């Protein structure tokens, strides 16, 4: 790998908690796929941290009024 990678601990903890408290138990493949979404490279010297979530779009009603 070119850069070291890290996983967002808070989001992964939420996924694992949901795995043990909901009917998702037994579907570990789905849990692993969700965890991989929060796996991102870490580059030293970056001016700002890499955003993990995208900005949502503004609703049409908000734009009209």
Image: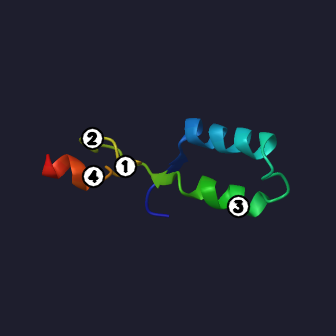
Q: CA distance from mark 3 to mark 1?
A: 28 Å
Answer left or right for 19 relative to 5.
right
Judge the density around disc 2: few (<14), some (14-19), many (≥20) Cα neighbours within 10 Å.
Answer: few
Q: Nearer the viewer, residue 56 or 35?
A: 56
* C-alpha gap between disc 4 and disc 1: 34 Å
Locate residue 44: give its quadrant: top left
Q: Mark 3 or mark 1: which is in front?
A: 3
Residue located at (64% from left, 38% from top)? 14
Mark 1 and 2 residues: CB-CB less than 8 Å, in contact?
A: no
Please, is residue 6 above or below residue 26 in the view?
above
Vertical position of residue 11 compared to residue 24: above or below: above
Q: Which residue does the numbered mark 2 point to in the structure image?
A: 48
Alpha carbon of mark 1 to alpha carbon of mark 2: how far? 10 Å
**Residue 43: where, in percent of width, then height?**
37, 49
Circle 1 or circle 2, nearest the eye: 2
Question: Which of the two residues, 25 or 52, is positioned nearer the viewer here?
Answer: 25
Residue 12 located left or right of residue 52: right
- At 64% from the left and 61% from the top, the residue drawn is 33
Q: Which mark is residue 43?
A: 1
Within 10 angstroms of label 3, few (less than 14), some, or many (20 or more) residues?
few
The nearer-to-camera label among 4 and 3 is 4
Which residue does the image show at 85% across and 57% down from the upper left?
26
Q: Which mark is residue 59?
A: 4
Q: Earlier in the sequence, mark 1 or mark 2?
A: 1
Q: Secondary structure at mark 4?
A: loop
Dot 4 or dot 3, earlier in sequence: 3
Tag of residue 30: 3
């Amino acid at each position: 790998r070119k850069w070291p990678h890290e996983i967002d601990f808070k989001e992964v903890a939420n996924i694992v908690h949901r795995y043990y408290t909901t009917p998702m138990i037994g579907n570990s493949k789905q849990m692993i796929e969700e965890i991989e979404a929060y796996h991102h490279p870490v580059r030293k010297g970056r001016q700002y941290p890499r955003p993990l979530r995208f900005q949502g779009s503004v609703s049409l009603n908000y734009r009209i009024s």
